[in-house]
């Protein structure tokens, strides 16, 4: 799994919908213009997010997209996995791939720890947290995203 342009655009679109949560549905054109995302690519992304149950589409005049749940109830992990599939930072952690040196790999345990922490961070970070990041001053971050104080690897 890699954080691709698709994930970046999808997450930015979701943050835009979070910013407007509780308001009228937002059109593809509005999202694309406010986030600098090409319309055709965004339409495909929004269909995948809709299929994952993260957003809803309203058709007709005044239609558009809106979040299915409040921003604090949608994690970054849900968005990324809806667009990219399960989180696997290296091939040996991807269940659909087979590693050539499955047994005796000197780094697989390390990557498993890092992958688990990455997944946890994505799962604990919500669209509301991302909104808070855009409203804080550069270099600061909301309490919920502050890094842990410890520095040892095992969790």
Image (tube, helix red, strand yellow):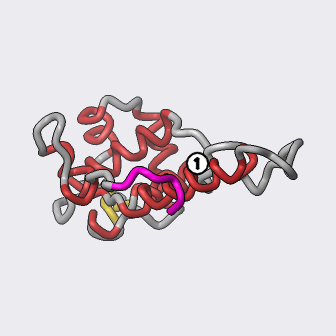
Q: Is residue 131 left or right of 54 when viewed as pictured?
A: left
* Residue for point 29% across, 41% down: 31
Q: Secondary structure at mark 1?
A: helix
- In this view, the residue in front, 131 or 93, is 93
- In this view, the residue in front, 131 or 102, is 102
Using the rendered image of the protein, determine whether residue 17 is visible from the camera's viewpoint.
Answer: no
Note whether 100 is above or below 93 in the view shown. Answer: above
**Over which residues does the magenta segment extend?**
150-155
Q: Position of residue 144 (x, y in %)?
A: 25, 59
* Residue for point 27% across, 50% down: 130
- In this view, the residue in front, 137 or 70, is 137
The quadrant in which residue 38 appears is top left
* Residue for point 18% across, 65% down: 22
**Label 1 crowd (10 A; few <14 / some 14-19 / many >=20):** some
Which SS type dominates the magenta stretch?
loop
Using the rendered image of the protein, determine whether residue 22 is visible from the camera's viewpoint.
Answer: yes
Q: Is residue 7 left or right of 16 when viewed as pictured?
A: right
Please give the residue where the numbered disc 1 appears in the rendered image: 84
Q: Position of residue 54 (x, y in %)?
A: 42, 63
* Residue for point 12% across, 44% down: 136
Residue 55 lies within the magenta run: no
User: Where's the N terminus, which quadrant?
Assistant: top right
Q: Position of residue 55 (x, y in %)?
A: 39, 61
Note whether 94 is above or below 68 in the view shown. Answer: above
Q: Position of residue 85 (x, y in %)?
A: 61, 53
């Amino acid at each position: 799994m890699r954080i691709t342009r698709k994930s970046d655009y999808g997450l930015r679109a979701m943050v835009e919908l979070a910013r407007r949560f509780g308001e009228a549905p937002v059109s593809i054109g509005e999202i694309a213009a406010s986030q600098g995302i090409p319309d055709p690519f965004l339409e495909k992304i929004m269909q995948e997010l809709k299929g994952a149950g993260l957003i809803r589409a309203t058709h007709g005049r005044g239609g558009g997209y809106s979040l299915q749940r409040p921003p604090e109830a949608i994690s970054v992990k849900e968005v990324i996995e809806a667009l990219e599939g399960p989180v696997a930072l290296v091939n040996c952690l991807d269940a659909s791939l087979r590693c050539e040196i499955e047994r005796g790999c000197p780094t697989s345990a390390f990557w498993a720890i890092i992958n688990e922490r990455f997944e946890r961070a994505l799962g604990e970070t919500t669209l509301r947290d991302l909104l808070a990041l855009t409203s804080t001053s550069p270099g600061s971050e909301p309490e919920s995203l502050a890094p842990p104080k410890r520095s040892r690897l095992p969790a």
